[in-house]
Amino acid sequence: QITLKESGPTLVKPTQTLTLTCTFSGFSLNTNGVGVGWIRQPPGKALDWLALIYWDGDKRYRPSLKSRLSITKDTSKNQVVLTMTNMEFVDTATYYCAVRYFSTLLDYWGPGTLVTVSS
Amino acid sequence: QSVLPQPPSASGTPGQRVTISCSGSSSNIGSKTVNWYQHLPGTAPKLLIYSNNQRPSGVPDRFSGSKSGTSASLAISGLQSEDEADYYCAAWDDSLNGPVFGGGTKLTVL
């Protein structure tokens, strides 16, 4: 059974750096073709893809946020970490991690974690 | 294209068939496969359809997907009250070099 769960702060201040951890089970990020991504959903708005890291270390970032994002993996801990610098009020959103396991996109998702940016 | 247009809402009565559309372009739906997700607020989005029309194990055959050109559709037949949720399409986008999602359709079962 594949599960993912996001963890991190629920409240950050403007200009701070957000660090979110995705802890997963039921698959290995060493397996050919597997990737883990981060997606966010501001309140009342659509889902936006943020970053993706593949089994071979290849990383992709949303172009408009590339300068603020970093995604890393720790296969020994079954974790993927997303950092986003210089947080702004508009970054308030529910952040999800998800795995590309058998389709060409994202198959299994975590329940999400709400991050609020407020001073 | 940062968001794939979907109708914001759809509705139907129990037993009816409803369809939800998703529009794209040549850089996403026109050249890539489409996934559909069901999302209940506060829970993990669930994969309903992948590769345009394939159902993962456990997804009822009441759910079906199709794609034509730069558009895709999700059909739900035999509508049930538990189908009330938000539905999102998604496809890889060559311009974004990552997944692009639909704006979401809120399905109400009357």
Image (cartoon, coloured by chain):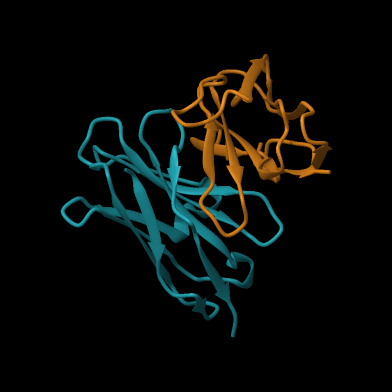
Chain colours: A cyan, B orange
Q: Quadrant of the N terminus of chain B?
A: top right
Considering every residue shown, the one lying at the far left of the view is A76
Q: How many marks?
A: 0
Where is residue A12 shown, x and y percent of the image?
A: 50, 78
Where is residue A119 shown, x and y percent of the image?
A: 59, 85
Left-right relation of B4 to A79 = right
Q: What residue is rendered at 43% in x and 72% in y?
A: A17
Residue B54 appears in the figure:
yes
Quadrant of residue B14 in the image?
top right
Left-right relation of A54 to B26 = left
Quadrant of residue A83 in the image?
bottom left
Question: A45 above or below A58?
Answer: below
Residue B103 appears in the figure:
no
Of residues A19 and B40, the one nearer the viewer is B40
Q: What residue is rendered at 40% in x and 61% in y?
A: A6
Quadrant of residue B38 in the image?
top right
Question: A72 above or below A92?
Answer: above
Q: What residue is rendered at 49% in x and 59% in y?
A: A112
